[in-house]
Image (tube, rainbow, N blue to C red):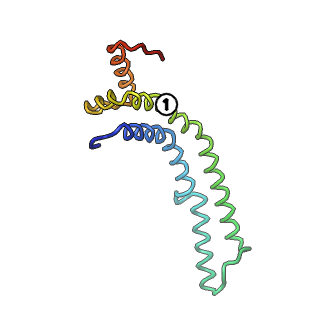
Amino acid sequence: MPNPTISDYINNALDAGYARVMNPVNKQIDALTKAPGSQLQRALKELEQEADRLEVDGKPMKADNPVLKETLRIIEQTFATVATLIQANDNQVEASGEVIAVPSVTAKVFLPLAGEMIKRGVDPVSSKALTFYREQIKRKGIKWQT
């Protein structure tokens, strides 16, 4: 990352926390929606075959077509399952963002120190950075309570 900013470090930390929580969920969602053998993909394939059959017969797809109705039912069911997976993990996603809040605010409050760390290649929102902030504050004789 050329000339990273505090915002870059904060965004990277937020992205890493989100990925830690959501990557397994996204894999489950992909399995439900994209896997060739998933119920959704099988239903979509059957619907496509039904559409092809109707086209060959010169007939339109009607709203009461059983294949269409079943496909729509499966889509609705799949979306409900995906929503449940996301909702089941929303607190963990929120918590992953909260973890970075204190280091982010600290880095912004102590901007000159954060800038020094960035120049030295130290992530200004890491636990190592918090130790550095405390040491520098103590060295300058500032009383700091957490």
**Element assignment for label 1:** loop
Q: Residue at horizontal 26%, vertical 33%?
A: 119
From the top left corner, tell me how far across and down residue 100 is, in percent: 46, 32
In this orientation, which residue lies closer to the viewer: 47 or 102?
102
Position of 123 with respect to 83 (left or right) is: left
Q: Residue at horizontal 59%, vertical 40%?
A: 90
Position of 20 with respect to 137 (left or right) is: right
From the top left corner, tell me how far across and down residue 94 is, in percent: 55, 37
Amino acid type, callout 1: Val
Which residue extends farthest bottom?
A: 58
Placement of 49 over or under 137, stated as above or below: below
Q: Residue at horizontal 66%, vertical 82%?
A: 60
Counting the numbered discs, the total is 1
Residue identifier under label 1: 99
Placement of 37 over or under 94, stated as above or below: below
Position of 89 with respect to 120 (left or right) is: right
Which residue extends farthest right?
A: 64
